[in-house]
Image (cartoon, rainbow, N blue to C red):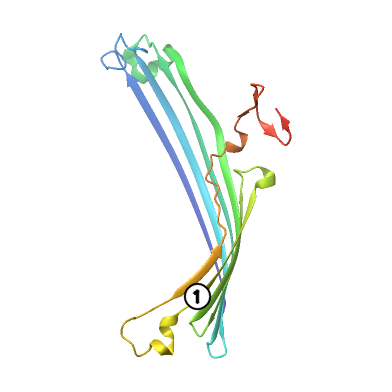
Amino acid sequence: KHLSFKSIAQAYQYRYQAEQFNNSMTRNGQPHSMRQVNGSFSTTKTANWTNENILTYANSFDGSKHSLLATAAVTFEQQGSSKYGYGSEFIPNEQQGMASLAQGSVYETTSSIDTKTKRMSFLGRVIYSYLSRYSLTVSMRADGSSKFAKQNRWGYFPSASLGWDFGSERFLQDQKILSNGKLRASWGITGNDRISSDDMYQQMKVFSGTTGYPLGSNWE
């Protein structure tokens, strides 16, 4: 009666292909251009899925003077993408269009392995209300993201708030200036993982002029 559970699952898949061919009659493919007859293509694939599981408890006590709403949730998410393609220049036989790319000289290659980002989150929240006028909310969230190194993969975000619905107080019942009034004070910590999936592997330059990937206290 007071307990409910909800689970939501979503999946999304997307594929995009782009082609471009500049023959000798175009500005970028005419004989005096840098690449002369040229063409390129690229294919991008994206696949994402999410799963949310929410458990809720709601109840009131002592003639509805006290009310309690507690929520626990766990979510899973994965985002993946890949891209590949290449460009060819100085194509000798432009009559075949895109089919003649292999006859030219490759000037650009785009190839990336599957880039996957995985996230997991745990959430706990309790909302207590007294006389539907005074409220206390306490929550705790833990988020894990594969974008960060293993030792820094999890972030913890507590929050708390106090609320007062003074519009329901007796001393405002007979006035006509305010129809409703609420005050809320809150505190919390926030964070995000809005960085590239490979940022933790970015090269860093040291004073000796060499480059490498920092792994712990060692450079490789």
Q: Nearer the viewer, residue 217 or 26?
A: 217
Q: Which residue is mark 1?
A: 163
Residue that appears at 38% across and 89% down = 173
Q: Quadrant of the C terminus?
A: top right
- What residue lies at 55% left-to-right and 47% top-to-bottom? 193
Q: Position of residue 37 (x, y in %)?
A: 34, 13
* Residue found at the very far right of the displayed protein: 217
Q: Secondary structure at mark 1?
A: strand
Residue 111 to residue 10: above or below: above
194 relative to 96, above or below: below
Residue nearest the viewer, comparing 58 with 184:
184
Q: Position of residue 170 (x, y in %)?
A: 42, 90
Q: Quadrant of residue 200?
A: top right
- Residue 143: percent from left, percent from top: 60, 54
Residue 165 is drawn in which quadrant? Answer: bottom left
Q: Position of residue 103 (x, y in %)?
A: 42, 12
Q: Amino acid at mark 1?
A: Gly
* Residue 124 appears in the picture as rendered: no
For residue 116, side relative to residue 91 (left or right): right
